[in-house]
Image (cartoon, grey):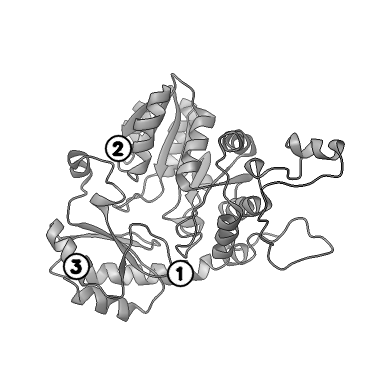
Amino acid sequence: MKLRDATLAAHAGIPEPRSEIAPHTQPLYQTSVYDFPSIDSSLPALAGKGGYVYGRNGLPNSDALARAVAALEGAEAGVATSSGMAAVTAVTLALCSAGDRAVIQSDAYGGTPAVFRRDFERLGIETVCVDAYDVQAVAAALPGAKLLLVESISNPLLRRVDLAALSVHCRDAGTALLVDNTFATPLGCRPLEHGADGVLHSATKFLGGHHDLLAGAFVGPRALVEATRGVITRMGLHASPMNAWLAVRGIRTLEVRMRRAWENAAELAKRLAADPRVSTVYSTENCALVSFDVGSYDAAERMVASLSLITFSPSLGGVTTTLSHCATSSHRALSDKERGALGIGPGMLRLSVGVENIEDLWNDLSRAG
């Protein structure tokens, strides 16, 4: 039976297979190692053929998170990681070796170009940044590239790439199309349905939804997931039991949280666009982020300092509304020139909209600064 979004989310992480002792939610397996009655009985788990033996090789809670994200994305398989950047690292190393080339979206989250330029390039993996909204420019950069990494909704300008068009060129070039779907969530976009080869998430954000965990996920075809899992196991990048358990708990309310946050974000974007203090507003449909420019660092600082309900928090995705300053948080790894080229000025703020009453949120914003 094909289940709909709200049902898939609400039933996330149900233990599989069910046993005679059937807890309604999966227990927290707070253990690093599992015991066996004999050497022979441990061999399948040690060979990765079922069961659990050691936390670095995988855990029931991280597998539950992987199953939940794979189900929501319509993927064949998945693996949970210690963070979103751990997922980026693992799949990149699964696909690329020294001498290979990776193509990434030029206006992606600042941590993404940072890890490619500062770490992967030291390993001999060439990095090419490209305007992902210019399909022909992407096509020209793809021949010989092992992967193209883009965001379904960009951070922080909230622009959408044409995944279907990019996937055609990736197939022609033999390049894996990887999509960071953190901002859209599987409720707003399912990249695999548009031709992507794999999907990444920072489960720390909307999937977990409560600012109380750090985790990531990669989902896609089984062969690519298993290659990625090998890197995760060797490098110790699996999600911890507690973080995975919290993420699954968060996913169970994903649909109701996101619907409310999307409604709030759309209304705040409309009101901010009419606010004389704001020069530009960036928003998109079915997205809980709104970015806006107040013109200068000083104006941004005044607004942040005078808020009482909305907190200044350099992250996103929780049930409460938070504000961050893009130049000093998400994109601080870039130079002033690089941020300027992307349109990220010193007065740009990114609002991660929660589930509060819209009038309370607007009262706080309208009085700020």
In the picture, the quarter occupied by the C terminus is bottom left
Please give the name of the residue rendered at 73% of the width and 43% of the height, measured from the top-left corner. 53
Residue that label 1 marks: 259
Please give the name of the residue rendered at 81% of the width and 65% of the height, measured from the top-left corner. 21
Q: Is residue 68 above or below residue 124?
A: below
Q: Is residue 129 above or below residue 3?
A: above
Q: Is residue 269 above or below residue 32?
A: below
Residue that label 3 marks: 303
CA separation in Å, label 2 and label 3 = 32 Å
Q: Is residue 141 above or below residue 332?
A: above
Label 2 packing within 10 angstroms: few (<14), some (14-19), many (20+): some
- Residue 352 place in picture, x, y as percent: 35, 63
Reading the chain from its start, which is encountered first: label 2 or label 3? 2
Q: Check residue 131 in the rendering and tell me which mark sits there, or answer none.
A: 2
Whether the residues at callouts 1 and 3 have beta carbons within 8 Å, the answer is no
Evaluate whether residue 125 shows in this view: no
- Residue 253 place in picture, x, y as percent: 54, 68
Mark 3 residue type: Met
Mark 1 residue type: Arg
* Count of marks, rendered view: 3
Q: Is residue 109 left or right of residue 276?
A: right
Q: Is residue 144 left or right of residue 361?
A: right
Q: Residue furthest top?
A: 99
Q: Quadrant of residue 263?
A: bottom left
